[in-house]
């Protein structure tokens, strides 16, 4: 079965990750955890929930099975691409670009407030929460101020992880120029999404 490396072309204005979606079945097959406030012993009243989701946005070198019509294949991202994607996401100011199950509509009140790459197998912050991802994984914390998403999706366990939305080229076709409406590009985007693309 074919294995395709997806890459970012920094010279392509459309290349990179434009949003992070909260989904029920993330393609990277890794769930996030929902954090509530730690108890404040000195406070007389119960602390309000932090409303944070922490999880992996991209895992390097992880084969992800995809099927496009009759074509079956695997995709993966190198450590270099994961690092580049995480940096470009922040440089573009896309922290507040979030969706639910890859719907076209962007949701208000959902913001990436932390972003880091795992560099240590033992002492990384993710280990504190029982998330044992490999070195080079892009981790994010997302603040959920959207009451509907928190109450009806997170607390009801209807979503379990993150899935990226973006534009990539594959290693074989990296020299070709793709437009946003190009069918080939749409096929590439489709392997990253659980439902419809927003291209």
Image (cartoon, rainbow, N blue to C red):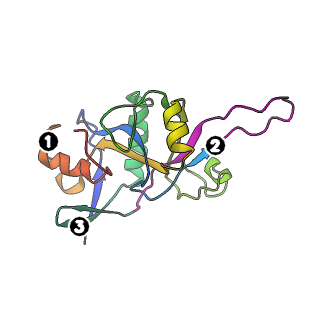
**Crowding at label 2, few (<14), some or many (≥20) Cα neighbours within 10 Å?**
some
> How far from the left and from the top, in percent, is residue 126?
61, 50
Find the distance from the CA under tag 2 to the CA under tag 1. Answer: 42 Å
Residue drawn where x is 37% and y is 37% of the image = 19
Q: Quadrant of the N terminus?
A: bottom left
Residue 64 at x, y = what percent? 35, 61
Disc marking residue 72: 3
Q: Nearer the viewer, mark 3 or mark 1?
A: 3
**Res. 169 in view:** no
| Residue marked by disc 1 | 177
> Please, what secondary structure does the residue beneath circle 2 have?
strand
Q: Which residues are magenta?
A: 36-62
Q: Main secondary structure of the magenta part?
A: loop
> Residue 108: image x %, image y %?
44, 27
Q: Is residue 159 left or right of residue 76?
A: right
Residue 15 tag number? none
């Amino acid at each position: 079965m074919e294995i395709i490396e997806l890459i970012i072309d920094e010279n392509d204005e459309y290349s990179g990750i434009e949003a992070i979606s909260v989904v029920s079945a993330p393609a990277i097959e890794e769930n996030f955890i929902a954090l509530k406030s730690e108890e404040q012993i000195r406070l007389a009243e119960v602390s309000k929930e932090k409303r944070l989701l922490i999880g992996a946005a991209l895992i390097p070198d992880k084969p992800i099975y995809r099927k496009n019509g009759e074509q079956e294949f695997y995709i993966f991202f190198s450590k270099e691409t994961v690092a580049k994607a995480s940096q470009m996401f922040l440089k573009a100011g896309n922290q507040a670009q979030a969706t639910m199950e890859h719907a076209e509509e962007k949701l208000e009140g959902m913001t990436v407030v932390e972003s880091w790459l795992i560099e240590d197998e033992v002492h990384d912050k993710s280990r504190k929460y029982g998330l044992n991802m490999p070195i080079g994984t892009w981790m994010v914390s997302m603040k959920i101020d959207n009451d509907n998403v928190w109450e009806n999706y997170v607390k009801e366990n209807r979503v379990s992880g993150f899935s990226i939305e973006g534009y990539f080229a594959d290693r074989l076709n990296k020299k070709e120029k793709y437009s946003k409406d190009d069918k080939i590009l749409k096929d590439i985007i489709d392997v990253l999404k659980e439902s419809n693309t927003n291209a």
